[in-house]
Every structure is written in C-alpha cells, then in structure tokens.
Image (cartoon, grey):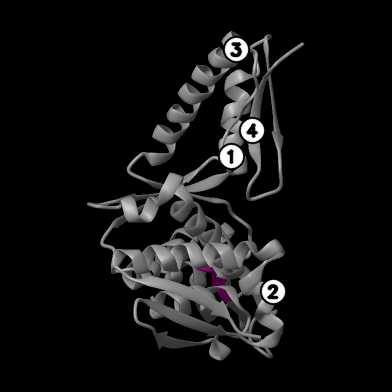
Amino acid sequence: MKEIEVSGKTVEEAIENALKSLGAKREEVEVSILEEGSKGFLGLLGSRQARVKVVLPDSPEKVINEFLTKVLADMHIEAGIEIRPREGYYFVSFHGKDLGILIGHRGETLDALQYLTNLAVNRILQNKIRIILDVEGYRKRREQTLINLARRLSNRVKETGNRIVLEPMNPQERRVIHTALQNDSQILTFSEGQEPNRKVVIALRH
Amino acid sequence: MKDLLITLAKALVDHPDQVSVNQIEGEKSVILELRVAQEDMGKVIGKQGRIARAIRTLVKAAAAHEGKRVVVEIIH
C-alpha cells in the first residue's frame, strides 16, 4: 500500500499531482481531502493551498503473489507463479518440476491451498475476489477424467440396473459429474452424506 | 513445516503477533502445537473445522516432502 499527501491550487490539481507521482489512475486510489483550499481575495490575500491524502491499495496480484511466494518458500518448493485476472476471478497457475506434492491425492493439497489463499488474500483486500489455483493444467485434466468416469459408470448402471455410489468429492467435482449426466434421460444423479464425505450417486431414472 | 504453519496462521488471524508454534520432535513424527489469541481461534479452526483441516492438509504435504510425519494441534 502506498500513501502520500500532496498540495495544489485546487483539490483537483492536488489529486492530479498525487496520481502523477504514484503513477496510478483515478479509479485505483482512495482520496481524502485534508484542506479544501481557497483562492483568497483577488488571488492574493488569504489564499490557501488545497491538500489531499491519496492512498493506493496493493493490487490483488501483488497480495496473491506475496502470500503464495512465502508459502512455497516455507514448503521448499520451487515454482513459478503466474497470475491472470479473468471474468469474475483470478487464475493462478504454478509452473515447475515435481509439483505433484502441491496437487496431492486427488487435488486435496491444491484445494486446501486454494481455500487458505482466498481467506488470507481477502483479509487484506478491500473488495472481495475469488482465486482459483492450478498446477500445469491439472484442473482441466481432472475435469476430463471425471467426465469420462461419469459416462463409463452411467453405462454400467444402465447395463446392470444397480446404482453406483462414487467416492467422496468436493462440490466442484460433484458438479462436474452431475453436469456430465444431466442430459441423459435414463440416468438420475444426486448427492448423499455430509461434507467432506459427500458422494454422488448414479442411478437409473424410473 | 513450522515456518509454514506460522505463515498460514499469521495470514488468517487478527493478532499475528500472538501466533506461536511449539515443535516437539518424536521418534518418527513431529508434533506442532499452534497457539493463537483466544479471539482468533475461530479464524484457524473455521466452520466445522474446515480451516484447521486445510492447514493440516498443507502442513502434512510439506512434511511428506521432507519424509516426515506431522501432527498439528491447536492449543486452547
């Protein structure tokens, strides 16, 4: 976070000066007026400069990067961090060798880090953001694996008539299964059990 | 592992200066005792222990990376 106090003939001029020295845009900063300023009599007697305090909060990218850099260092993991703003969220992707440790069993380590990153970063930022973490395209691959699994198991349900209960999954993964089978008129999917052991059930629709 | 636990806890609480971790070495495993300010307990435990679970998952992953077993205890 950067904070400066700047003067000018008018409030507008003071803000302009502040933005110039911060190298920031108007919509990025918070301005508080310390002194309105006045022209005085004939622009001479009793003229007072306007004074403003301008605060430039840290960007979400910077806050995310600082937190994750520290966590990776503490875990003795060497990885590049790439942060891209997307529609409605920030997509963070780790690059490097042997990052399986960061993914964990079925992505549980990555999900834990993602959850904690969202909490830690949103404690600092004024406006809440959503952060999604990924390692070398893992999320996409996992999604495709789940879609394939859903199709394969739904075929078996149709052959045998028996329902199949999947292993526990988080809400995002369960949604992938439900979505993959929602247009299948012979198949019904629903979830049962309590978090974090909630499981998708694939059954025949009667 | 200890550093990681301190980093995570400090990033979640209102009183980072009151975060401390005591490391107890066992034969095969390490116990990490986490202490935070009383009013910050909820910040490291979370609803139905969700935050504590995420912290443990991450610290265990770091420990496995070093070939160790670790238990994280949150001390009241």
Residue B41 image point, x, y percent: 67, 79
Q: Residue at x 62, y 33 (%)?
A: A175
Q: Residue at x 59, y 54 (%)?
A: A129
The answer to whether marks 2 and 3 sit on the same chain is no
- In the picture, the disc for residue B42 is 2
* Mark 3 Cα shell of 10 Å, populated few (<14), some (14-19), many (≥20): few
Q: Amino acid at mark 3?
A: Thr
Q: Label 1, label 3: how many angstroms apart (C-alpha)?
A: 28 Å
- In the picture, the disc for residue A172 is 1
Q: Label 2, label 1: how many angstroms apart (C-alpha)?
A: 25 Å
Pointer 4: what residue? A200
Which portion, as a residue range, is magenta? A54-59
Disc on the earlier residue, 1 or 3: 3
Question: Is disc 1 in contact with disc 4, using a CB cutoff of under 8 Å?
Answer: no
Between label 2 and label 3, give the one nearer the viewer. Answer: 3
Question: Is disc 1 in contact with disc 3, using a CB cutoff of under 8 Å?
Answer: no
The chain carrying label 1 is A
The chain carrying label 3 is A
The chain carrying label 2 is B
Q: Secondary structure at mark 3?
A: helix
Q: Label 4, label 3: how many angstroms apart (C-alpha)?
A: 18 Å
Pointer 3: what residue? A160
The answer to whether marks 4 and 2 sit on the same chain is no
Residue A59 image point, x, y percent: 49, 62
Q: Amino acid at mark 4?
A: Val
